[in-house]
Image: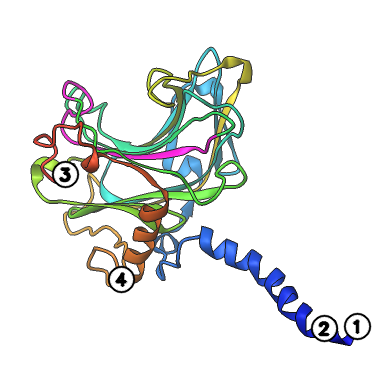
Amino acid sequence: MASLLPCNIPVLILLMIIPFMITAAQNPPSPGYYPGSRISTIGFDQGYRNLWGAQHQRVEQGSVTLWLDRSSGSGYKSLRPYQSGYFGADVKLQPGYTAGVITSFYLSNNEAHPGDHDEIDIEFLGTTPDKPYTLQTNVYIRGSGDRNIIGREMKFHLWFDPTQDFHNYAILWTPSEIIFLVDDVPIRRYPRKSDATFPLRPMWVYGSIWDASSWATEDGKYRADYNYQPFIGRYKNFKIGGCAAEGPASCRPPSASPSGSGGLSQQQQSGMEWVQRNYLVYDYCRDWKRDHTQTPEC
């Protein structure tokens, strides 16, 4: 028995450390700084109101649940427009068959500038049970997406199952950059390279769930199947740290980095590169089928 002990000890140690190694491999490195932690959480009614589908929306203890069925989806809107800021929420998605369904959190001025609007999107593209959700980030500037469809999509899978628990998703929009964050890990940075390729007009904050069967899942191959209704999106722990459109010109939005001067720290940059190396599934700048004269920032 004693002679077996030296051989068994390394095996036992290996069995103990393998789960930690797997977890470390699946999670991004620490960003070292968490901009969301500096923004106070607000209840739904403190920052938002129903926009449409009131019968498909339930507000409880500061959170909101939206659902989509054959009759309608639902959406909400911030109480005021913003010129810049940090906008986030914890979201939990529905498991199972959700093809064709979009659950979203985004900024837009479509109601103020129909046909000529700006937009910054976080959209969860529904899926079939054998495939993961896709998180789509997008930026539209002055009507692109209306008359002139010029999307700036970057799509990701996630390093966790977004149906198992709430996770935080946020947009940080400043006069110089847009940063998309998941659990305060930057996944995409979109810098202002010119006024023509950057949204500068005030926007409202929105959330919604709706049927986008024509394109959401594998370019419309799989459509919403209402045998699985209702499709549910849950939102809580809302955070708004922004400069209201009617606020003072001296207002400055939060910074994504500890320096306070914009951009990302080296540690945050490393985290973003890890996400893009392991979970980026589409980048419009690398799509050779696109006309990149329309996206000069590439």
Query: At label 4, which amino acid type do we have?
Result: Gln
> In which quadrant will I find the N terminus?
bottom right
Mark 4, secondary structure of its residue: helix
State the residue position of label 4.
Answer: 266
Quarter of the picture holding the C terminus: top left
Q: CA distance from mark 2 to mark 4?
A: 45 Å
Residue 72 in the image: above or below residue 266: above
- The residue singled out by tag 2 in the image is 5
Relative horizontal placement of residue 157, taking residue 188 as reference (left or right): right
Q: Could you say where residue 242 lies in the image, as x and y percent from the top left?
A: 31, 52
Q: Earlier in the sequence, mark 3 or mark 2?
A: 2
Foreground mark, 2 or 4, reads 2
**Quadrant of the rendered structure where residue 284 is?**
top left
What residue is pinned by disc 1? 1
Q: Which mark is residue 198?
A: 3
Dot 3 or dot 1: first in sequence order is: 1
Q: Position of residue 21 (x, y in %)?
A: 58, 67
Span shown in magenta: 131-148
CA gap between label 4 and label 3 equals: 24 Å
* Badge 4 or badge 1: first in the primary sequence: 1
Q: Say which of marks 3 and 1 sits in front.
A: 1
State the image coordinates of residue 162 (x, y, percent, origin top left): 55, 44
Pair 3/2: label in front: 2
User: Which three-letter amino acid code belongs to the residue tagged 3?
Assistant: Phe
Q: Is residue 12 above or below residue 58?
A: below
Element on which disc 1 rests = loop
Q: Dot 1: few (<14), some (14–19), or many (≥20) neighbours within 10 Å?
A: few
